Amino acid sequence: MNTNNASRKEFLAALLTTGLVAAGCSSNKKSPFEAFAAEDVKETGEKVKLLSVDGEVIEVDRAYLKPVPEMPPVSNSEARIGMAGKKFVMVIDLSRCKNLRKCQNACNHMHHLHTGLSWLKVYPMHEDEHTAPYWQPTTCMHCDEPPCVKVCPVDATFKRQDGIVLIDNDRCIGCRFCMAACPYSTRVFNWESPDITEEIAKQPYSCESSVPQKKGTVGKCDFCPDMVRQGELPHCVSACPNGTFFFGDLNEDTVTNGAETFRFSDLIKDKAGYRLMDDLGTKPSVYYLPPVNRNFPFESGLENS
Amino acid sequence: MENSLNKEQIIADLLPQKFGRRGVIWVAILVGFCLVGLFAYYRQARYGLIVTSMRDYASWGIYISNFVFFVAISLVGSLITAVLRLTGVSWSTPLTRISEIIAVSAITFAAIIIVVDMGRPERFINLLFYGRLQSPIIWDVIVITTYFFISLLLLYIPLMPDLKIMIEAKQKEGKKVPKFYLFLGSFWKDTFMQSRLSKRAIHILCIAIIPVAFCIHTVTSWLFATTYRPGWDSTNFGAYFISGAFLVGAGAVLLAMVVLRKVYNLDKYITNDHFDRMGKITVMLGMLYLYFNVNEYLVPAFKMKKSEADHLNDLFTGSFAPVFWSAIFLNMLLPITILLFKRGRRPIPMFIAGIMIVVGAWFKRYLIVTPTLLHPFLPMHNVPKSYLHYFPSWEEWAIAMGSLAGALLVITIFVRIFPIIPIKETISEFHETTHK
């Protein structure tokens, strides 16, 4: 994973450099990199292929690629406001879930959660003897009337204009009132120092990435706003092989699981979408499609539990 | 018998006395408990709350129930000093200072134990920097601070004339007066103006403390009642908590009366009449709390809504049943039964009743906090085994017991350095009765 991360960083660096090159190349077309490279750079002779903004493939010596320092993408105050004009929603299609928990693994992995902690849970739901059992994944509901935000004494958990509820782990005092207040049992606590690598622990913290998690503070699903800013889907959505999770923007009325895209309002209307414990008045941003015409029998999920 | 007491005799009887051998052992035991608690807290500060048995479901444990217990017991200050004083009850005079020091000590340790429960105690100051009024925790911070200062004033203002008496007594014996007493009391000249001001101040504070006392425990109950959880989602909670608080506070006063009377030979000041009256008050408070308990459990048990049913069955007949029924009997049914009879309203049975009330009340608070958390709306699934149950770790026990010992230590030290029965007020009361 670490090597993967490194190559990804380098690739981003390359993109940034080519961006600069493209901006400056009109005046100096012959040796575009010389103008920007420091004088003591020694060429390694190893060429890397890059795609320029013009769509041309160009070759650049590896020595000119500089790793971009890992910076939080947005400031804390920006992260508290959220993305303008957006209202993020999720739709979870219960007919597609067979308790593979790829979503959970991807989420735990990408957020570097402490062993045993999971933000995302998959529950076997069986209301009564004569009702049908089904698998129910839960994320944070990102309620529009969030009980957790109401009770937080220090504004460490907050509601943004794009509908996302986040936690500022640098401010959280660890009173755990939010955990008591949340009816969806969505919040987890870092009872000890998270077992993360030193490299991850040194990363500058951002409420949007929720990395690194900190001892004595509360954590929960963050709807991956850092991924969304990069134009990508939350980790659980892209990790599910069955396309159970759909993510999107209510204002655009669109949700997608990566492979299929639906008009949100039609999807909810056609499949009778509902929200969990709607009677509590929390107004969740996560909608569920009932487990009808299932892709898998309930029993097929038992082998994973 | 009362008429035989003159002023000098009262002063000599009521001045604080040095600890005897029993006193030294008692203090040593308390200090021992505190030290073990401190060591446990050092471990918690170092390794995190992982040293407790709390996990994501039972995310609050005996720290929080201990907090509720402390807040509850601190209400006694307002009951004995304010409610009884304002209603013109004069027999409560010897008990005012005892109950006020119990209140101050308990509310102090309530604040300490809530910091102990925090995952990041060093960020406590965030409550001032980023505090938001919408959170019941901030309400609690505000009212508890207010209550602490009013209680402290209600302890201090009636103490000033007694400090003068103490200073004079020391001077008469030719002993050096500790600076501490001079600092606290030397400006009290006992002028007409000063007594009038102090009387008015006490009167105003007695009125002011009643709503604040109701606030501290109502807000504490709202920490639970403002959530959706079965067992907490109740409109009954404020009154239920306050009635329980008055009961446990009365229980604590019963204990203090028996112990202080025995240790300091205060039979002339804490009389059988005091026990009789205090016993009657305790019966009334016990029945009141019982009434709210019936409301709290019987009404949801009649309906047995699905989410409530799991919780209630676990309390009535499930894994919490032994603790639940013990608490109901110890905290309410048995003490009420004992104190209903005149023969029960004597020092020894009342001491037993007092212990039952206080111990039962401690477990009652535990039953309010933890079972609810172990019955969430969504099933507890695919979590480590340790998440499914809660039994406090040794560190939690040590810290909780250490905090209780700390509160007792504060009271003990207070009794050592100040007269626990108000001297001045006792003198003037005897004066009034003899001149009638």
Image (cartoon, grey):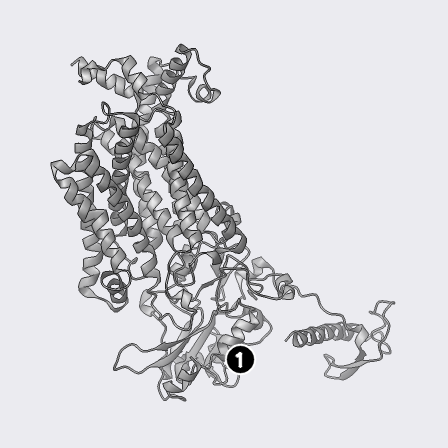
- Residue at the spot 25% in from the left edge and 36% down from the top edge: B254
Position of residue B318 measured from the top left corner of the image (x, y, whole percent): 26, 64
Q: Which residue is mark 1?
A: A238
Helix, strand or loop status at disc 1: helix
Which one is nearer the viewer's eye here, A115 or B185?
A: A115
In the displayed structure, B342 sits above or below B91; it is: below
Q: Quadrant of the N terminus of chain A?
A: bottom right
Q: Chain of mark 1?
A: A
- Residue at the spot 42% in from the left edge and 48% down from the top edge: B398
- Residue at the spot 29% in from the left edge and 76% down from the top edge: A127
Which one is nearer the viewer's eye here, B151 or A73?
A: B151
In the displayed structure, B287 sits above or below B150; it is: below
Position of residue B342 measured from the top left corner of the image (x, y, whole percent): 12, 36
Q: Is residue B145 visible?
A: no
Q: How many marks?
A: 1
Q: Quadrant of the C terminus of chain A?
A: bottom left
Q: Is residue B261 visible?
A: yes
Tell me if B94 is positioned left or right of B133 in this view: left
Q: Amino acid at mark 1?
A: Ser
**Hey, which quadrant is residue B428 in on the image?**
top left
Label 1 crowding class (10 Å Cα cut-off): few <14, some 14-19, many 20+? many
Which one is nearer the viewer's eye here, B219 or A80?
A: B219
In the displayed structure, A253 sits above or below B341; it is: below
Position of residue A22 measured from the top left corner of the image (x, y, whole percent): 76, 75
Position of residue B373 measured from the top left corner of the image (x, y, whole percent): 35, 61
